[in-house]
Amino acid sequence: MLFNRAKIFVFSLVLCLALGPTFVQAKDEAPLSYENVEMGVKINCPDSWFITPGDKVQQALAKGIADLTSTESLKEAIKRVGVLVMFSQYQFGSPIEYNPNVALVTEPLSGSYIDNAMDYANASLMNIKTMFKDIKVLVDPKMIKLSGKDAAHFVYEGTMVRGYLEIRMKSSVYLFIKDKLGYTLTCTDKVDNFNNNVAKFEKAVNSLEIK
């Protein structure tokens, strides 16, 4: 499914762009949160991390996408993928090798062959295997409850390649369907640093509210 492939492509690019859009830093004593009342979702930012609004991430992608893919159909599909918010340990666009992050992304599912969260997870994993090198599935897709709703979860490692740069990363992926939209929540970091952020990842995931 092209939209699903575009969503995975967005995940692989979003932290490779050397841009610095608007950000807000969460404070330890008063964690900031993202809430979309219309969509009925809310999630807290990890303590002391940065919040980048989805529209800023989309703008950065729009500016840099031409340099990163020549596939016109993929460029068009990416326009349909909605980045709602991204939380990151460092300011978005910081000159570092990889920025640990939590991202919430949506895509339309109407007319697709996906009927439930498990279908969605399997389709996502299939596309991940085409987008990254040396994929290793650490936790197979399984059904879970997320904010009391049916969802799916899996964990994988993969190598992201951009030019001569190769980064081995690990991602914990949560997926659910609501009102004909697919939602994907990812917690991603370099493999050798992932465990250092597990507590923050889990706290953010557990704060998710789906209304």
Image: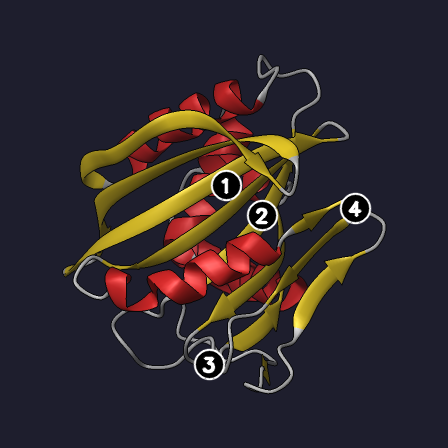
Q: Nearer the viewer, mark 3 or mark 1?
A: 3
Q: Nearer the viewer, mark 4 or mark 2?
A: 4
Q: Measuring from the top left, give residue 119's x and y in whole percent.
A: 50, 18
Image quarter of residue 43:
bottom right
- Looking at the rendered structure, which numbered label has been put on residue 39? 4
The CA distance from mark 4 to mark 1 is: 18 Å
Badge 2: residue crowd in 10 Å (few <14, some 14–19, many ≥20) = many
Residues tagged 4 and 1 counted as in contact (Cβ below 8 A): no
- Looking at the rendered structure, which numbered label has been put on residue 91? 3
Image quarter of residue 76:
top right
Of the pair 100 and 8, the residue shown nearer to us = 100
Residue labelled with disc 1: 7
Q: Which kind of residue does numbered mark 1 sit on?
A: Lys
Residues tagged 2 and 1 counted as in contact (Cβ below 8 A): yes
Q: Quadrant of the C terminus?
A: top right
210 is higher (above) or lower (below) than 59 = above
The CA distance from mark 4 to mark 2 is: 12 Å
Q: Which kind of residue does numbered mark 4 sit on?
A: Met
Badge 4: residue crowd in 10 Å (few <14, some 14–19, many ≥20) = few
Q: Measuring from the top left, give residue 48's x and y in whole percent.
A: 50, 83
Residue labelled with disc 2: 105
Name the element at disc 2: strand
Q: Earlier in the sequence, mark 2 or mark 1?
A: 1
The CA distance from mark 3 to mark 1 is: 22 Å
186 is higher (above) or lower (below) than 33 = above
Name the element at disc 4: loop
Residue 22 in the figure: left or right of residue 20:
right
Of the pair 160 and 148, the residue shown nearer to us = 148
Q: Which kind of residue does numbered mark 3 sit on?
A: Gln
